[in-house]
C-alpha cells in the first residue's frame, strides 16, 4: 500500500512540474497539423453576375445580368485558415451609345486567403452543419478574348490585375460533401471592359451555388490547451508507466494474499491464531478496498473553458467504461467536475464544471454503462483539488 501511495504521489508531482514549466500558447494554437495532402477541397459552382462602373451605368440592372461558372481548389492549413486557387469565368454585359447592349466574355484566376469565421468565433466542432467563410484575394483577369467578341464589340483582348472579396456559406450535407452559396465581388481598372466607361474602375458582382468535395483526412485533432504534441505524448507515456507499475503491484499483492492464506491455515489450530488470522483478513480487505478506490479513480482533462471531450480522453473513458461494466454491478461511481479558479466567475466556473461532469456521464452511458451506477456533480470553485496547479482543475474526476 505504501508503494502505491508513493507511486501516485510521484506521478502527481511530475505532472504538476511539467504543467508549471510549459509555456502557454495563444488560443489560435492547440491543433495537431495534418499532412500536406490532407484537408483539401475541390469546388464547382455556377450562378449569375453583373458588371458596373463607378461612373454612369446605362441600361436596366436586369439587362446587365449574365452567367458565371467557377472551379476552385482549397487547402486548409488549420481549422480557421486556408488558401484557395479559383478560376471563375463567364460573360458580362453593359451598354454603349453606338453598339447598344454589349456582351463580352471574361476569365479571372485568383488566389484567396480563406478565414473560417465559424471555427474562429465558435471553436472547432466536427459536427458543425454551417460554416461562414469570408475571403479576400488577388489575381489576373482577361476579357473580350474571342474572335466573335472582337467582331461584335469592335475591340481586342483586354487584361489587368484585379482584387476580389467575398463571403462563402458552406452547408455540410455529409462528411465528404458541402453545399455552397458564394457571394463575391471583384474590382479592376475600367480598361478591362471592351466598352468605354466614364468611370475609373469596374466592379463585378456575382452570386453562385455549387458543391464541394472534401478528400483525404477531413477533420482535425485538438491538443490540450497550453501543451505541445510532445508534451501530451510524454504525459500519456507517464500514465502508461504508472498503470504498468500498478499492475505489477497487483501481482505482488496477490502473492502476499496467498502467503497470508497459508499462514492462516497453519495457525488455525488455536483460537489465538484464528483471531490473528481474522484480523489480518480484515486488514487485507481494507487494503484491497483502498487499492480498488485508487485504481478506479480517473482524471479526464479538458481544454480551457471547454467541455468537449478530446479523442484521447474518449479513449481513456472507453477503458473506464469497460472496467465499470466488468466490475461489481452494485458499485456506484461519482463523477465530479472542476474548473480553473484563476479565471471566470464562481457561477461560470460551476456551470463549466457541471457541463464537464455531465459530458463524462453521457459518454459513459453511451458506451453501455448502467446510469444507476453513476452520479455526477459540478463543484465549480469549491473544493480546489489542485491549488498549486490551477490548469489541472480543468478536469472531471471519476471515483
Image: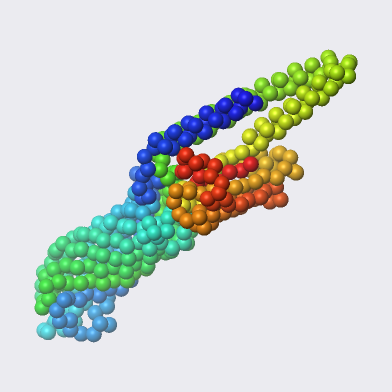
Q: Residue at x 74, y 27 (%)?
A: 283
Task: Name above or below for residue 238 compared with residue 96.
Answer: above
Residue 117 picture location, percent across and down: 36, 60
Work out whether residue 163 or residue 5 is closer to the camera in this orientation and state it.
5
Is 42 positioned to the left or the right of 165 in the image?
Answer: right
Residue 67 position by quadrant = bottom left
Q: Residue at x 48, y 48 (%)?
A: 340
Q: Is residue 40 visible?
A: no
Is 110 positioned to the left or the right of 360 in the image?
Answer: left
Work out whether residue 201 or residue 365 is closer to the camera in this orientation and state it.
365
Q: Quadrant of the C terminus?
A: top right
Q: Residue at x 43, y 63 (%)?
A: 130
Residue 241 picture location, percent across and down: 54, 28
Q: Is residue 24 visible?
A: yes
Q: Quadrant of the N terminus?
A: top right
Residue 326 picture location, percent across and down: 70, 39
Q: Residue at x 47, y 43 (%)?
A: 390
Task: Name above or below for residue 109 compared with residue 193.
Answer: above
Amino acid at each position: 500500500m505504501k508503494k502505491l501511495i508513493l507511486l501516485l504521489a510521484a506521478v502527481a508531482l511530475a505532472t504538476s512540474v511539467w504543467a508549471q514549466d510549459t509555456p502557454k500558447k495563444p488560443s489560435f494554437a492547440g491543433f495537431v497539423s495534418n499532412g500536406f495532402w490532407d484537408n483539401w477541397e475541390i469546388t464547382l459552382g455556377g450562378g449569375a453576375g453583373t458588371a458596373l462602373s463607378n461612373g454612369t451605368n446605362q441600361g436596366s440592372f436586369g439587362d446587365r445580368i449574365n452567367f458565371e461558372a467557377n472551379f476552385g481548389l482549397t487547402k486548409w492549413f488549420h481549422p480557421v485558415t486556408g488558401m484557395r486557387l479559383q478560376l471563375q469565368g463567364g460573360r458580362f454585359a453593359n451598354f454603349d451609345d453606338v453598339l447598344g447592349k454589349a456582351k463580352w466574355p471574361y476569365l479571372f484566376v485568383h488566389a484567396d486567403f480563406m478565414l473560417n469565421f465559424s471555427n474562429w468565433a465558435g471553436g472547432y466542432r466536427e459536427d458543425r452543419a454551417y460554416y461562414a467563410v469570408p475571403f479576400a484575394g488577388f489575381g489576373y483577369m482577361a476579357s473580350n478574348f474571342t474572335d466573335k467578341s472582337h467582331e461584335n464589340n469592335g475591340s481586342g483582348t483586354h487584361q489587368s490585375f484585379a482584387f476580389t472579396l467575398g463571403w462563402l456559406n458552406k452547408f455540410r450535407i455529409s462528411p465528404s460533401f458541402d453545399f455552397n452559396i458564394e457571394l463575391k465581388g471583384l474590382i479592376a481598372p475600367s480598361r478591362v471592359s471592351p466598352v468605354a466607361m466614364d468611370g475609373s474602375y469596374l466592379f463585378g458582382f456575382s452570386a453562385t451555388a455549387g458543391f464541394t468535395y472534401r478528400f483525404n483526412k477531413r477533420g482535425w485533432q485538438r491538443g490540450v490547451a497550453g501543451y505541445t504534441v510532445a508534451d501530451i505524448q510524454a504525459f500519456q507515456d507517464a500514465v502508461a508507466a504508472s498503470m504498468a507499475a500498478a499492475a505489477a503491484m497487483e501481482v505482488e499483492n496477490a502473492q502476499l494474499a496467498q502467503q497470508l492464506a497459508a499462514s492462516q491455515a497453519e495457525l488455525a489450530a488455536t483460537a489465538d491464531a484464528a483471531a490473528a488470522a481474522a484480523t489480518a483478513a480484515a486488514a487485507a480487505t481494507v487494503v484491497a478496498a483502498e487499492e480498488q478506490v485508487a485504481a478506479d479513480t480517473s482524471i479526464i482533462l479538458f481544454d480551457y473553458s471547454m467541455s468537449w471531450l478530446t479523442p484521447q480522453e474518449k479513449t481513456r473513458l472507453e477503458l473506464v467504461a469497460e472496467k465499470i461494466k466488468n466490475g461489481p454491478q452494485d458499485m456506484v461511481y461519482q463523477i465530479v467536475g472542476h474548473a480553473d479558479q484563476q479565471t471566470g466567475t464562481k457561477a461560470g466556473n460551476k456551470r463549466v464544471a457541471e457541463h464537464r461532469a455531465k459530458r463524462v456521464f453521457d459518454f459513459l452511458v453511451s458506451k453501455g454503462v448502467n446510469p444507476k451506477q453513476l452520479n455526477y456533480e459540478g463543484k465549480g470553485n469549491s473544493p480546489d483539488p489542485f491549488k498549486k496547479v490551477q490548469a489541472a482543475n480543468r478536469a472531471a474526476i471519476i471515483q
